[in-house]
Amino acid sequence: MLFNSVVFIILFLPAALLGWFLLQRLENPIFAKLFLIGMSFWFYGYYNISYLWILIVSLVFNYGVSALLERFSGRKACTGLLAAGILGNLGLLFYFKYFNFFVDNCNFFLHTDFHVEKIALPLGISFFTFQQLSFVIDRYQGEAPHYPPADYCFFVSFFPQLVAGPIVLHSELLPRLQERKDIRRPSADHFYDGFSLFVIGLAKKVLLADALAVPVNAEYENIMALDTPSAWIVIVFYMLELYFDFSGYCDMARGIGRMFGFTLPENFDAPFQAASVREFWRRWHMTLSRFLSRYIYFPLGGSRRGKARQCLNLLVVFLVSGLWHGANWTFILWGLMHGLAAVFETLFPGARFKWNWLNRLLTFLFVTLSFSIFRSDSLNEALLLWKKLFTAGNSGFFIAMCNTLRYPENYALVKFLEMAAPGLLNPFYAVTFCLLAGIGIAAVRGRKAEQWIRDKGNSGWGGFCLAPLFVWSFFSLSQVSVFLYFNF
């Protein structure tokens, strides 16, 4: 089920909220927890019911490891249990996400002829696997208690963050579920703040990301026809599409969590204001960066063992990040590029321009170029696109790209301009330019939605903006599209 679908907004979310708050009135909170767990299973199984069993098996396995760690606390057996928990989670992820990739590369490099059926990738497996892996490690280190089964199941399956994050730590969800008695009562402030955040995320996805997806998808399927200006436009459009798509999802997830009374972690903090690659990763997909730092970078030694070891640790972390995103050499190359850039910044911290705006621009260009490989289906396709970026000349193809942005809202503005300014040479391109300029400014400024809510959300002006924004977004749901990070 998708957040940006009519069935979710009209049926699922109201039913889940109503059932949760009605059952909170009961003395025993277990009924409300079980209800929301059941709704989360419905949410996950709605996409493909067979994937639900994979989630349940993963839940049972990891909770079993947690229970055994509780039973054998302080004994040598705990080390073996930790190894079993890590291998079990990584094994599940390897089979569903990387096994076909592994076999294909064995056949290529070893000249073998193994054949396996294509294994479908279960929705959100990378997210709920990493979330449970972090819990198992924290349990072993004594940083997480052993929770009751319903609480643990709630922690993993809570539907706003189940499919595409943010990656939540147990300390960010379970203590509130257990200890905060006021969570049983609905809060008007929590609901309003959550709904406002949901509307802003929905608008990012439906009005911005999906609009940019039209030319991006069309031109990535027709790279041969691109000239140099259009190739640059495509990769910039994709960078903006990915940002609005994923940050929009996270805003919606956090907004829904807020409506239920929970505060999920932030995942984006104005990433296009970053003046270095390492700063970019402190602002982009922040919960993944936190996971990789906490469970890979620091255990490897971090920066405590000299520059050489720190650089090696950075390369390992970014290669893991690339592999986490997908089983393709494009993701590995993408991770390696970011790893090498982070190593360069570590070895030469003074290699920066005195103008911060120029550092930001160069960081954006590097990130955009690297994500063009991220988007490509193969290294050959990425190489062809990069050739187009620098050697394809100018055939005027980018004008045709503008025509892909002819959607109803744009058309209405064009007609208005034709009536208001009949002498305007081409109102369609004027509207398109203004639209894209606005999108670019919104992405670069990256102002937090929560800040806007605090400033304007509870005022009449805030309500005046949010109401039509929700209506506009809702009536733009005729062509529902999945979120990009569902593929990872």
Image (spheres, rainbow, N blue to C red):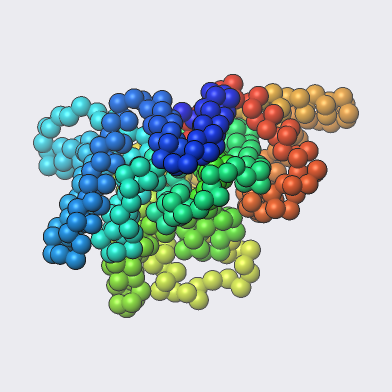
* Depth check, front residue: 15 or 241: 15
Left/right of residue 55 with respect to residue 345 in the rendered view = left
Q: Is residue 76 above or below residue 202?
A: below
Which residue is at 80% across, 43% downward? Answer: 460
Provide residue 329's location: percent of width, then percent of height.
31, 45
In this rendering, does residue 231 appear at all? no
Which residue is at 50% across, 76% downward? Answer: 350
Numbered disc total: 0
Which residue is at 23% across, 43% downward? Answer: 61
Left/right of residue 30 with respect to residue 477 in the rendered view = left
Left/right of residue 446 with respect to residue 331 in the rendered view = right
In this rendering, does residue 323 appear at all? yes
Which residue is at 63% across, 69% downward? Answer: 355
Provide residue 65's location: percent of width, then percent of height.
22, 50
Quadrant position of the C terminus in the picture: top left
* Depth check, front residue: 414 or 41: 41
User: Could you say which quadrant of the image residue 71 lies in?
Assistant: bottom left
Provide residue 143's location: percent of width, then percent of height.
33, 63
* Depth check, front residue: 291 or 232: 291
Provide residue 301's location: percent of width, then percent of height.
30, 71
Q: Is residue 354 above or below residue 88?
A: below
User: Could you say which quadrant of the image residue 382 lies in?
Assistant: top left
User: Could you say which quadrant of the image residue 386 lies in?
Assistant: top left
